[in-house]
Amino acid sequence: MPELPEVENVKNGLTKLIIGKKIMAVDILWNNIIKDPSVEVFRRELEGETFREIKRRGKFLLFVLDNYTLISHLRMEGKFRLESSGQNRTKHTHVIFKLDNNEELRYLDVRKFGRMSLVAHSDLQMHPSLTHLGPEPVENNLLKSHLEHKFKKTSRPIKAVLLDQSIVAGIGNIYADEILFLSGIYPGRLAVDLSEEDIVILHQSILQIMAEAVNSGGTTIRTYSNAYGLEGSYQNKLKVYGKAGEACSRCGHTIEKTKIAQRGTHYCPSCQVH
């Protein structure tokens, strides 16, 4: 957490809150959050920059400024909050962007796993965070032919392939399980063994699940919330993830959990047999 749908909704919320606002100063309370450049350069170069646009690539937030793009990966529990400068800061506040209207954009992260990079616009596409990313799982971007080409080259389980950000950007553990359940494909099946019909179904399932999750504001399992502090609602639509021991909504068989690609994997042994 968070995966693409959650990051997309954070992006949409922040767009309404901070576009057009200028950064007057930056306080960095936990240096390891800053991946590159140095903390000193990061702080200095952001002063006077204005938020112009916010984009998303895979699970990365891209804050487009006047001269730079700020790349932010929330990892497990990172979140942004817009608060007044006089409001008390929590102990989990690690980066503070002081704005020109007595507000602060604060980055909070209980586990401190999140990372930020500041990159000149001209260097953005060459930054290591972005160069390896596959296509977005949306219509007209993710093509069935792309999946066919990639699947032919790997003998890994299809669950592992869906989690590979170089093949499809933005799918994480929750949505991989849901996509495979909708497709009726066993998560441990080798990608290279999928038939053309399987890939057609899988392609459509990826587009459907990811679109539904975005429209639902993402999934809140533990602490995710968007820029307004609101939780997502897709957890109410989950069919297998987190349902181990419960009856399958499709066939009534008991949902099971195993480990594939070092990740907890939920599936129905009756519905997902091929």
Image (tube, rainbow, N blue to C red):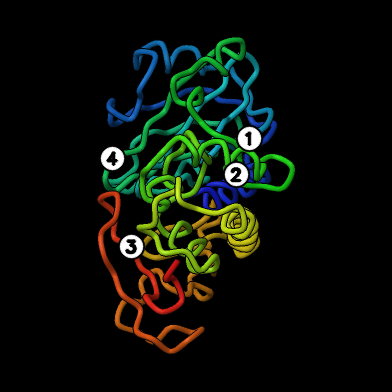
Q: Residue at x 57, y 42 (%)?
A: 147
Give the distance between the C-alpha atoms of the residues marked 1 and 4, in whole angstroms.
23 Å
Where does residue 5 sit, x and y in percent of width and height? 56, 53
Circle 2 Cα neighbour tier, 10 Å, few/some/many (<14 / 14–19 / ≥20): many
- Residue 257 drawn at (x, y percent): 29, 70
User: How many numbered circles does the render carry?
Assistant: 4
Report the mark closest to the observer, 4 or 3. 3
Helix, strand or loop at mark 2: helix
Residue carrying label 1: 55
Residue type at mark 2 is Lys
Q: The residue under label 3 is which amino acid type?
A: Thr
Labels 2 & 1 near each other (Cβ < 8 A): yes
Q: Nearer the viewer, residue 150 or 5?
A: 150
Q: Earlier in the sequence, mark 2 or mark 1?
A: 2
* SS for callout 1: strand
Labels 3, 2: front one:
3
- Which label number is shown at residue 11? 2
Near-viewer residue (158 or 98): 158
**Distance of mark 3 from mark 2, alpha carbons?**
28 Å
Using the rendered view, name the quadrant where residue 35 is placed.
Answer: top left
At horizontal 56% and vertical 56% (from top left) the residue drawn is: 228
Asked if residue 160 is positioned above or below residue 213 in the image, the reply reads above
Marks 1 and 3 close (CB-CB < 8 Å): no
Give the alpha-carbon distance from disc 4 to disc 2, as whole Å: 20 Å
What residue is disc 3 on? 265
The residue that mark 4 highlights is 112
Sequence order check, earlier mark of 1 and 4: 1
Give 52 or 246, whichever is nearer the viewer.
Answer: 246
**Could you tell me if the residues under marks 1 and 4 are in contact, i.e. CB atoms within 8 Å?**
no
Residue sitting at x 54%, y 69%: 233
Spot occupied by residue 125 in the image (x, y as percentages of width and height)? 57, 18
The local secondary structure at tag 4 comes to loop
